[in-house]
């Protein structure tokens, strides 16, 4: 077997981890906002862990909280643009570049796989990558060499559909594709803009502890039931008045098929947040 064949064999057999990222407030992590120091430090640790992977991913599939559609939709531009889906920030926030290639053939395969499983899906050749993709992308994969795709959430925000989506994507891990959920474990926008009470801090911490226990400690059946019924968790609706920033975790949990193997917890903008890794 020559070196090219060996490289191809290693690539085909590589199993990539799954990663859930709390991506912070718009472009602020890229602007070194002091309120994001904890998150920025966590990302530095995650980047070191990514550097230690034996095989670099051949593609990154992001599921971002910032795209909802009537059916699952996948970006399919050969060279995706960026969608600056925020406003009111310094000019530098709108000059960010992340010239990653797309992965059109992979997008087609994902669409076909979902359609074959009666989960309607289609391609979008024009939509750019939103900040739920390019902010963590720049921080973790700054070379912009690895092709990136983005997959939408469903507007229904149905937890069962997003768990199933993750399960259907699980096989991509064996094809050297890294699945990355990008949301925020705490996403009460109103709370970010006032100091908060001790009672609110307790709700935040209670939900983070519940999420940690669910992803790190529960068996498969317990984890699925807890995620399906996440609204019953302590502090659930305080931390997520609307659940679009939580549902990427459901996709990750489905795609992992196992307990998370590592967690990073931090304080950002005065609130507790977390990121997770599945081997």
Image (tube, grey):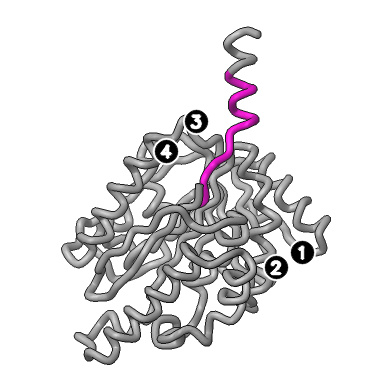
Give me the disc on residue 144.
4
Q: Position of residue 21 (x, y in %)?
A: 42, 59
> Which stretch appears magenta?
7-18
* Residue 183 image point, x, y percent: 45, 66
**Residue at 41% across, 68% down:** 184
**Residue 136 locus on image (x, y percent):** 38, 53
Q: Which mark is residue 55?
A: 3
> Mark 4 or 2 closer to N-term?
2
Q: Is residue 8 magenta?
A: yes
The reply to whether dot 1 and dot 2 touch (C-beta < 8 Å) is yes
Mark 3: which secondary structure?
Answer: loop
Q: Nearer the viewer, mark 2 or mark 3?
A: 3
Q: Is residue 119 left or right of residue 82?
A: right
Q: Earlier in the sequence, mark 1 or mark 3?
A: 3
Q: Please name which of the two marks, 4 or 3, marks the residue nearer to the observer.
A: 3
Q: Earlier in the sequence, mark 2 or mark 3?
A: 3
Mark number for residue 71? Answer: 2
Disc 1 + disc 3, Cβ < 8 Å:
no
Q: Which residue is mark 1?
A: 120
Kind of element beneath mark 4: loop
Do we see residue 155 in this rendering? Answer: no
Q: Earlier in the sequence, mark 4 or mark 3?
A: 3
- Label 1 and label 3: CA atoms lie apart by 32 Å
């Amino acid at each position: 077997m020559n070196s090219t064949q060996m490289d191809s064999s290693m690539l085909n057999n590589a199993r990539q981890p799954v990663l859930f990222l709390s991506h912070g407030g718009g472009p602020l992590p890229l602007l070194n906002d002091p309120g994001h120091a904890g998150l920025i430090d966590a990302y530095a640790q995650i980047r070191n862990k990514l550097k230690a992977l034996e095989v670099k991913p051949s593609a990154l599939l992001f599921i971002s909280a910032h795209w909802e559609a009537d059916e699952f939709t996948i970006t399919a531009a050969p060279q995706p643009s960026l969608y600056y889906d925020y406003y009111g920030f310094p000019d530098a926030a709108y000059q960010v570049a992340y010239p990653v290639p797309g992965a059109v053939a992979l997008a087609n395969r994902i669409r076909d796989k979902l359609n074959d499983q009666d989960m309607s899906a289609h391609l979008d050749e024009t939509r750019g990558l939103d900040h739920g993709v390019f902010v963590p992308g720049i921080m973790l994969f700054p070379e912009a060499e690895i092709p990136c795709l983005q997959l939408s959430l469903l507007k229904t925000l149905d937890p069962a559909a997003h768990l199933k989506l993750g399960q259907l994507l699980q096989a991509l891990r064996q094809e050297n594709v890294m699945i990355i959920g990008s949301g925020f474990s705490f996403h009460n926008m109103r709370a970010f803009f006032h100091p908060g009470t001790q009672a609110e801090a307790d709700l935040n911490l209670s939900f983070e502890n519940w999420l940690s226990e669910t992803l790190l400690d529960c068996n498969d059946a317990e984890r699925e039931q807890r995620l399906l019924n996440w609204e019953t968790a302590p502090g659930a609706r305080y931390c997520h008045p609307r659940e679009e920033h939580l549902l990427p975790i459901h996709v990750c949990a489905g795609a992992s098929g196992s307990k998370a193997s590592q967690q990073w917890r931090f304080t950002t903008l005065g609130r507790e947040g977390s990121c997770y890794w599945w081997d």
